[in-house]
Image (cartoon, helix red, strand yellow):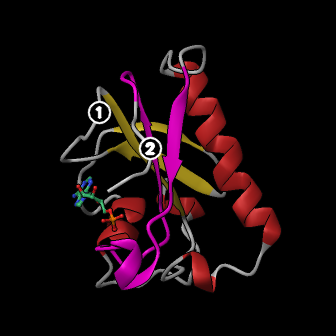
Amino acid sequence: MSDLTPLAAEPTCLFCRIVAGTIPATLVASTPEAIAFRDIAPQAPVHVLIVPRAHLPSLDAAEDPALLGAVLALARQVAREQGIAEGGYRCVINTGDDGGQTVGHLHLHLLGGRAHGWPPG
Ligand code: AMP
């Protein structure tokens, strides 16, 4: 996995370190652009984080449509592989302070295996 890690990795960033394999995570899928691993504090029966390999602080910093497409495509793939595509699922990208983002590396939450209410909290 680390062979594909871009030079843009930030050594102090938690998710860069997971991408590099220096912090363990339960990997469920991987592509040249992104990885998918289980959230350490799951909020649903299936809670997977889709994380680009390149360090981008948030969605607001992500200017490459191809990279964003790769993140979404991996979310769709994982949803199918995890068996939640038929029942439905939610994708969330918390962005910035008001968005509730706590880790400063762009990530998409894939949540499924239960019904989700609206509006969100
Ligand atoms: P956010 O609040 O949107 O920035 O989401 C950050 C997510 O990262 C939270 O759902 C955390 O539970 C999750 N998280 C934090 N540390 C780890 C870790 N070491 N492995 C997996 N997930 C983590």
Look at the picture and state if 53 lies above or below 35: below
Q: Residue furthest right?
A: 66
Look at the picture and state if 59 lies above or below 118: below
Q: Is residue 47 visible?
A: yes
Residue at x 47% of width, y 62% of height: 107
Ligand 1, seen in the image, is in the quarter at bottom left
Q: How many marks?
A: 2
Look at the picture and state if 56 lies above or below 66: below
Q: Quadrant of the C terminus?
A: bottom left
- Between residue 113 and residue 6, name the one nearer to us: 113
Residue at x 64% of width, y 54% of height: 71
Which of label 2 and label 1 is nearer to you? 2
Would you name the residue on which mark 1 appears?
44
Q: Taking 99 as reference, is 80 left or right?
A: right
Would you name the residue on which mark 2 appears?
118
Name the amino acid, label 2.
Answer: Trp
Q: Which residues are magenta?
A: 88-115
Name the amino acid, label 1.
Answer: Ala
Expressed as whole percent of the image width and height from the top left, the position of residue 26 reads 30, 39
